Structures are given as structure tokens and as C-alpha cells.
Amino acid sequence: MATDVALDTTMTCTNFATLAQRNYYNNTVIHRIIPNFMIQAGDPTGTGRGGTSIYGDRFADEIHPGLKHAGAGILSMANSGPDTNGSQFFITLAPTPWLDGKHTIFGRVKAGLRIVQRMGLVKTGEGDRPVEEVRILKARVVEEGEEEG
């Protein structure tokens, strides 16, 4: 899966890219899947309560009114309220306009949206946790013009 990154969210993009380059996301579980809503990942503890940013524990939102959760494949920071971004992120499975202005959007799925949609169909149990583990084996940043391979 590859993503396009929104340039108006410099700190967020840098955080995500640096964590990926440091192999922070490698072999971590997708800890939350809600059908027709989103897939959440980025917590190395796998609990949905862990993870830190490259800036320390948390960093400020970079909300831009022109960036909307307008459909499937939007890459956005998960948070527990204003200015609580760490390492966790989510990918939308459908339009989620009620999240606009509350979560920093910093990219979109450029290739592999069908894989994301299939992940959205995974059977889940308590806490929207997948019954069978779904993992990010290797995360990497794909630069403009570079092959996803």
C-alpha cells in the first residue's frame, strides 16, 4: 500500500515517515477495525493505548480546513483529544466527515486500497479488535515517482 502525503502537515508527515524509517511500525498489529469506518494501527504495544512520537510523548494537531475525511483511504492521526498525536494512525474505510477538524489528515492510500477494504472485512471481537491478528510486516515511505514494490 502506498500513500500520498499532504504537505500542509509537516510535523505529522515527518513523524510518520521517521517512525517508518526507524522500523517502529514493523511487525505491529492492527489493533482496531470498525467496518465501514476505519482501521487503526501504529501502537507498538498492540493495546491501542501506547506509542510515542519522534517529538516526545505527544505533539500538536495540524488541522487544515481544506483536508477532509471525504472517503476511503484517508490517512489520519489517531488521538485522545486535541494535541495528543503520538504514533497511532487510522485509515478510513468510508467518508467520515464528523472527524474533520478533530484529527490531522496527512495522506491518502495511493495504491492498495483493495487490500485496505479487505482488512475492513476482518472479523472482530471485543473492543473492535481483530479475532485473528492482522499485522504491518514492514512500513516504508514511498517517495513521489518511486515504485511501491
Image (cartoon, rainbow, N blue to C red):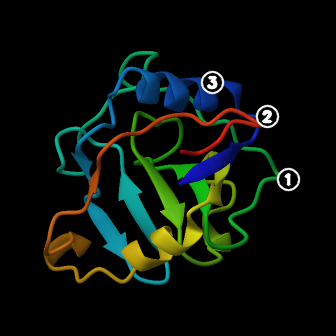
Residue at figure coordinates x 21%, y 69% from the top left: 129
Residue 12 sits in quarter? top right
Residue kind at label 2, given as amino acid type: Asp
The numbered disc on residue 66 is 1
Question: Real-space Cα distance between discs 1 and 3?
Answer: 17 Å
Residue kind at label 1, given as amino acid type: Gly
Disc 1, disc 3: CB below 8 Å? Answer: no
Residue kind at label 3, given as amino acid type: Met
The numbered disc on residue 11 is 3
Disc 2, disc 3: CB below 8 Å? Answer: no
Q: Secondary structure at mark 1?
A: loop
* 130 vs 27: above or below: below
| Residue 106 can be seen in this image | no
* Label 2, residues with CA under 10 Å away: few <14, some 14-19, many ≥20: some
The numbered disc on residue 129 is none
Estimate the x, y position of residue 72 in percent, counting from the top left: 62, 72
Estimate the x, y position of residue 32 in percent, counting from the top left: 30, 65
Residue 11 sits in quarter? top right
Disc 1, disc 2: CB below 8 Å? Answer: yes
Q: Is residue 71 left or right of residue 55?
A: right
Question: Real-space Cα distance between discs 2 and 3?
Answer: 9 Å
Estimate the x, y position of residue 104 in percent, counting from the top left: 62, 45
* 148 vs 144: above or below: below
The numbered disc on residue 8 is 2
Q: Residue furthest top?
A: 55
Residue at figure coordinates x 21%, y 71% from the top left: 130
